[in-house]
């Protein structure tokens, strides 16, 4: 494959806008280096930024992942994007929005890169057996109501070398598609999927992309490891697991491991 030689120039608000179905609805910030686009977007949210503000960085020095982890975010080779949603009336379906974001990323990867992404519950996206994208959703409250949510998406596009324990689990899209086009496609897809939040239609698509349904999984709760089979995902996005003891339980959050592997 052609060697990728990217620079910040493939990321610009104008290029992203030119790919958007309704560019007038979005405020877009493109930064070279930032600690975390989620933190930057949070600051904007607390200072009156509008619904549909998008922050994208070429490089993050302290990218954040779920469960207090860091997200490796080298310059040039990834898409690090946070979308601030703060609709009038507040955020009614935070879990469904992260599901919609995962589906939006998968649709974008299939459309632009001709690959078959799969979602490892809750919302890690795998391509060719490697974790290629992670999603971190963070909500903010105002007078007890969820007033905004920031959907942070970290997509490895052409990163070739990963540090330490990421080496065996992380991968990249290995595509030459321009990052502005990928960003625009994800934004468009999420915009299309938002009205489906809370519907079985969205869950059915999410299930069709699942890497875990029908598979043996394990997870740890209160210091105890459980083994079972992932049998369904309900309308709330919870994972239904039939334990090896035949007990059925509902997982609302957390992390599972697939088979004998310990995916990050
Ligand atoms: C995970 O895999 O645990 C979630 C990773 C989310 C990373 C993205 S990159 C853009 C946004 N800014 C952050 O600091 N984190 C998210």
Image: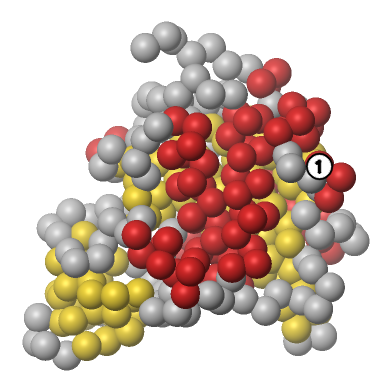
Task: Check mark 1 vs ligand 1: CB closer than 8 Å? yes or no.
Answer: no
Element under disc 1: helix
Residue 235 shows up from this direction:
yes
Quadrant housing residue 28: top right
> Residue sitting at 45 percent across and 79 percent down?
235
Quick one: which residue is furthest to the top in this view? 2
Residue 60 shows up from this direction:
no
> Residue sitting at 65 percent across and 67 percent down?
195
- List x then y, in percent, for residue 109: 46, 39
- List x then y, in percent, for residue 187: 66, 47
Residue matched to label 1: 23
Q: Is residue 91 left or right of residue 227?
A: right
Q: Is residue 176 left or right of residue 138?
A: left
User: Alpha-carbon neighbours of circle 1 within 10 Å: few (<14), some, or many (≥20)?
Assistant: some
- List x then y, in percent, for residue 9: 70, 18
> Residue sitting at 17 percent across and 64 percent down?
215
Q: Is residue 203 above or below residue 209?
A: below
Q: Is residue 15 left or right of residue 122?
A: right
Quadrant housing residue 140: bottom right
Choose between 53 and 223: the one closer to the eye: 53
> Residue sitting at 15 percent across and 66 percent down?
216
Quick one: which residue is furthest to the left in this view? 245
Quick one: which residue is furthest to the front in this view? 201
Q: Is residue 263 above or below residue 244?
A: above
């Amino acid at each position: 494959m052609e060697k990728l030689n990217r620079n910040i120039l493939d990321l610009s608000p104008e290029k992203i806008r030119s790919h958007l179905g309704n560019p007038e609805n979005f405020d877009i910030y493109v930064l070279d280096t930032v600690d975390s686009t989620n933190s930057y977007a949070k600051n904007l949210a607390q200072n009156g930024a509008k619904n549909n503000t998008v922050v994208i960085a070429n490089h993050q020095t302290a990218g954040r992942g779920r469960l207090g982890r860091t997200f490796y975010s080298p310059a040039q080779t990834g898409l690090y994007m946070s979308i601030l949603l703060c609709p009038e009336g507040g955020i009614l379906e935070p879990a469904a929005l992260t599901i919609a974001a995962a589906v939006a990323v998968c649709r974008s990867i299939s459309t632009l890169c001709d690959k078959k992404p799969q979602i490892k519950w809750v919302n890690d996206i795998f391509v060719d057996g490697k974790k290629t994208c992670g999603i971190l959703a963070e909500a903010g409250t105002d007078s007890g109501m969820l007033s905004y949510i920031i959907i942070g998406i970290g997509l490895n596009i052409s990163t070739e070398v990963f540090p330490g324990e990421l080496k065996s689990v992380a991968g990249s899209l290995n595509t030459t598609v321009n990052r502005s086009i990928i960003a625009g496609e994800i934004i468009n897809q999420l915009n299309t999927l938002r009205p489906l939040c809370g519907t079985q239609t969205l869950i059915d698509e999410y299930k069709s992309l699942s890497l875990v349904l029908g598979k043996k999984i394990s997870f740890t709760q209160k210091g105890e490891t459980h083994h079972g089979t992932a049998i369904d995902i309900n309308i709330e996005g919870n994972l239904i697991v039939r334990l090896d003891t035949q007990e059925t339980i509902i997982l609302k959050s957390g992390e599972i491991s697939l088979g004998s592997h310990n995916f990050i």
